[in-house]
Image (cartoon, rainbow, N blue to C red):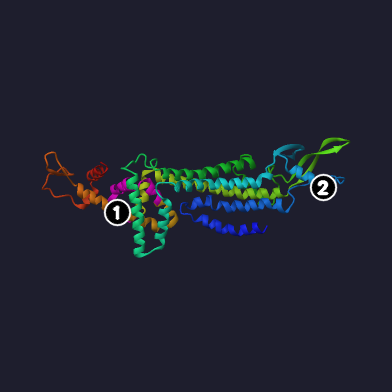
Amino acid sequence: MSSAISFLFHVPSWVKKRACHPLDDAVDRLSSSYSIPVLFVCFTLSVTNMLFGDSMSCWTNKEFPGHWANFYSYYCYIQPQTLVLEAGTYRRYIAYFPWVPYIIVVQAILFVSPRTFWHFFASRAELDLHAVLERATEIKDLLGEQRQKVLDELTSYMMVYNEFTHKGSNKLFFVLQSPTAMAYLIHKWAYFGMALTQFKLLVHILGNGDNLWGFHAMKQLLEGNTTTSNVFPLITYCQVPEMFDGQYRNRMINCLMTFNILYEKIFIVIYFWIMFLTVVTFLSAFISTLRLFVPIWRVRAIHSRLRPGDVEPVKQRLVNRFLYYALHADGLLALQLIESSCGRETAEDVTRTLFANFTFSFRDRLRRGVSGATSNGSRVNNYGTMNGTAPPAEHDLLTSVPLMDRAFNSTEA
């Protein structure tokens, strides 16, 4: 008992440690880190009757001694079905109540499984997201030159990784060419799938398919109606064998199961929690999919983290090239995780530094590639004019589509 009480005191620190993992956003933590203590409380309440009270009390005739009454109670408790009297007829129902603690444990495992999959995949991905997020966490707590130093180290790592891992631009398969981004979306939709599956099973078993079962049960509870469902009946009937004149025969006895009142209230709490998770996990998965799959949402994610002065006079074209040639899906996902774990300011600083490094590199490419040699040795710039023509201004360099395309094509070649 002392060890169990000690474990209860360690639960808050365990939850706090899990809830702060940078690979998880707020919705992920709701589904995994915060669902565990909710289900743990429900599990503790469900086993209280088993440890400190009678699971089932069955009424027997006075001629039966006490140990026979206990035997009948245990015998009825382990039966796979219960008998409920409805309109003068006995109807059989599956006995779920002995399995309630185990069902709650399975629910907890299901909620943790998407997190386990994502962390396992992220630990083996080419882009070390753990290292990226650790450095981003350091940036959040630093100031001045130290902050800039760590920021430069982080952005240099991300630029070098993307340069050597992704060659050129692939707008059509932007997400599909990134296993890490695909695993992230899979784990997002897995959270929603787990919540929806549990919700549908819950309403199918407890509410006969009524999606509003929890609201109806809560209404009855607030009105003072203590009636229980057929899944968790308060009074049941059980056929027990007894010896009569040297022969066994079945005898019908009735049993009182007060713990079923508590079980139904536990599942009302679980119903509303899972319904809430179903909504928020769907919204989170849907928004994450839009951010990675829809081009306008990708560009908007970059623009939102840049100051207006960072984009002028580059406008839209250079931002697109920064996204598709330098950042790619891995970098976009990393920025999203940095913002969710380290805050908006840190994500903006990382984005601006990445964009500044890309712009500097891009200007250097354009200056080197602004003129090309013709077949007869004459020098021709990217506008098709011969030597002697003044080179384009820097503003024209950064906003000229032919110059941009030629610079990137020459780099890829």
**Residue 406 got which mark?**
none
Q: Is residue 409 above or below residue 54?
A: above
Residue in the image at 50% along x and 43% along y:
190
Query: Could you tell whether 372 is left or right of 315 in the image?
Result: left
Instruction: Decide if residue 347 is in sight here.
Output: yes
320 in the magenta segment: yes
Instruction: Name the residue furthest top.
Output: 247
- Neighbourhood count class around disc 2 (C-alpha, 10 Å): few under 14, some 14–19, many 20 upward: few
x and y percentages locating residue 376 in the rendered image: 11, 39
Which mark, by number, is residue 67?
A: 2
In the rendered image of this protein, does residue 23 appear above or below residue 201?
A: below
Foreground of the two, 283 or 88: 283
How many marks are shown on the rendered structure? 2
Give the farthest residue toward the right: 245
358, 288: nearer the viewer: 358
Q: For the C terminus, which image quadrant? A: top left
Who's the residue at 25% across and 44% down the image? Answer: 411
User: Under tag 2, what secondary structure?
Assistant: helix
Q: Position of residue 128 (x, y in %)?
A: 41, 50
User: Is residue 353 found left or right of 116 in the rendered image?
Assistant: left
> Which part of the image, by quadrant, shows the N terminus?
bottom right
Three-letter code, disc 2 = His
Q: Could you tell me which secondary element the residue under label 1 belongs to?
A: helix
Across and down, in percent, residue 266 comes to 64, 50
Residue where numbered disc 1 is placed = 357
Residue type highlighted by circle 1: Asn
Please state the extent of the stretch shown in magenta in the rendering.
307-334
